[in-house]
Image (tube, rainbow, N blue to C red):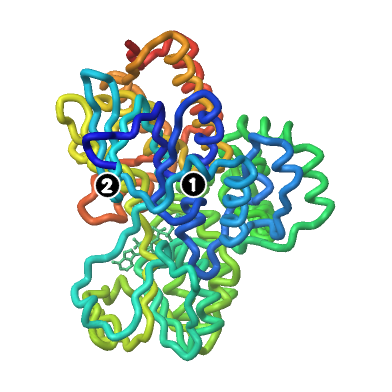
Amino acid sequence: MNDSAPETLDIVIIGAGFSGMYALYRLRRDYEVLCLEAGDGVGGTWYWNRYPGARVDIESAEYSYGFDNDLQQEWRWPELFAAQPDLERYANHVADRFALRDRIRLSTRVTRMRFDESSNLWHVWTDRGGHLVCRYVIAATGSLTASNTPEWPGRESFRGQVLHTTEWPREGVDFSGKRVGLVGTGSSGVQAAPIIAEQAEHLYVFQRTPAFSMPSGNRPVDPDYERDWKAHYPERRKQMLETYGASLVKYPTVSALECTKEEQERILEAAWHSRSAFQLLVCFTDVLTDMAANEVVCDFVRRKIRQIVKDPQTAHLLCPTTYPIGGKRLCIDNGYYPMFNRDNVTLVDARATPITAFCEEGLQTTGRTWPLDVIVLATGFDALTGAMTRIDIEGEGGLRLQDKWREGPTTYFGSMVAGFPNLFMIHGPMTPSAQAQMITTGEWQVDWTARIIDDMQREGLTRIQTDETAEHWWQDELSQVANATVHRHADSWYRGTNIAGKADVFMIYVGGFQRFAQLCTAAVEEGYRGFRRS
Ligand code: NA7
């Protein structure tokens, strides 16, 4: 398309991940909708993150669509925690089963958007020369989309291969006989490392900050478990939405500080062996709200690490001591700590001797040169805001989103931004995001957004926006609940502190999904409080 003949639509959805695909399904009945996707396939996070060991850390019975009962009855998850290939297969199945593909344009990245105030329409431009005009844009761009690559010099001089976990080659990578350097020990690094170690001649794990990790307890799905879920899906989906994390984990009743040492130990052991991810964070009522209670769990995990890892120096280095457990995302692993007992694995302290450059042979730290054949960057994401700020978005009066968010994101419910009418985000910054199960909560946010658009249509309105008063109110609510938790004591992508120069602002709503949903619903039902419609 060229500029003289833009394509006209009601709604443009950005992203064909799980939320974008559901938005397309939900809205295409009543509107002209097109979904633009940068990748050459659907699935979003589960399209891009195809590194070895990539696997969801929430049970798949929960982490799956609930909008169509036939779908959840028919689909079979082979494992309790689905691996990336199964999640991608599921995304493709949904695209086919609900005939979504004809409205998804793949390999099409949105590069620029501008709101035309005279017509209340968005202009959207793509990297393929496309120009679209639409009433609404729904950005389902994902929390973890824009990858973070350290800016070490000398990359072109390195003789080997450099890979990033989030841009993994579709054909896979053969590590046999290779010396591999893995940088980063967040969820991606912790999942990838044990698989790479099985193949590589030698794996060097470059750790800047040790992770807290818990064994996942992944296993093939038991037929009784599957039958039980399928018999109760509709009511369980409803129950999930009434919980803190949109997940049916066992929520605790007892404070760590009220237990005897023996009781603490019994509860912690049960959580560790529960074969249910994240149980450590909810084994006491106050793990995420009280530093002393949190330390009880930290101490337990450090003792586990020292029991599992035979070399005392490696074990010592693997023990996190500088931040509370759960303050940043707890990792869920499949053999991470035992892997350090292998002869072909070395832990490198990239805190004491930081990486300074790529060099011809491999990586250069302040201490020495590490000869490598492959460098795997598991260095995370410019999370939550990165996917949006990498698009040049111009709202009212020439206001640019990158500028507006320079000191951190401002939003109303993580959905709208003052100055950017008719633009909605799903899982935007300041939503519960990864603190709640994201497929189910994405569906909920899409339904809430669709309802707003339906109301606009029915009432003959063409412009909806929020204002700074509403944004301040949401910021206050978010800060109040965040300040009551341990999250402020950990550097992480939740706060933007993983990216050099990014504003240090807590960006996730940790007041619980249930409360988030109640507040969103009430605002709409009580006269569109915090919105202006015209
Ligand atoms: P994370 O959790 O942000 O982890 C990134 C890791 O990369 C972390 O260990 C970082 O250390 C490390 N890192 C980043 N830059 C560097 C440099 N320059 N040198 C050494 N080490 C570095 O990203 P993931 O992809 O693992 O996981 C993201 C989410 O996906 C996860 O939370 C789940 O929700 C799923 P640092 O801790 O900053 O010292």
Residue at x 47%, y 45% (from the top left corner): 16
**Dot 2 lies on which element?**
loop
Q: How many marks?
A: 2
Image-quadrant location for residue 131: top left
Q: Position of residue 350 (x, y in %)?
A: 32, 73
Residue at x 82%, y 47% (from the top left corner): 227
Residue at x 29%, y 74% (from the top left corner): 352
Image-quadrant location for residue 307: bottom right
Q: Is mark 2 within 8 Å of ligand 1?
A: no
Seen in the picture, residue 83 relative to 289 is either above or below; the reply is below
Labelled disc at residue 463? none
Q: Position of residue 26 (x, y in %)?
A: 55, 30
Question: In the figure, is residue 51 to the left or right of 461?
Answer: right
Seen in the picture, residue 478 relative to 352 is either above or below; the reply is above
Q: Earlier in the sequence, mark 1 or mark 2?
A: 1
Residue that mark 2 sits on? 129
- Please indicate, yes or no, whether residue 289 appears anywhere in the rendered image: no
Q: Position of residue 276 (x, y in %)?
A: 66, 54
Seen in the picture, residue 460 relative to 363 is either above or below; the reply is above
Camera-side residue of 4 and 364: 4
Seen in the picture, residue 118 relative to 240 is either above or below; the reply is above
Crowdedness near tag 1: few (<14), some (14–19) or many (≥20) residues, C-alpha within 10 Å: many
Camera-side residue of 329 and 371: 371
Q: Quadrant of ligand 1?
A: bottom left
Question: In the picture, which quadrant includes the C terminus?
Answer: top left
**Dot 1 lies on which element?**
loop
Residue that mark 1 sits on? 17
- Please indicate, yes or no, whether residue 387 appears anywhere in the rendered image: yes
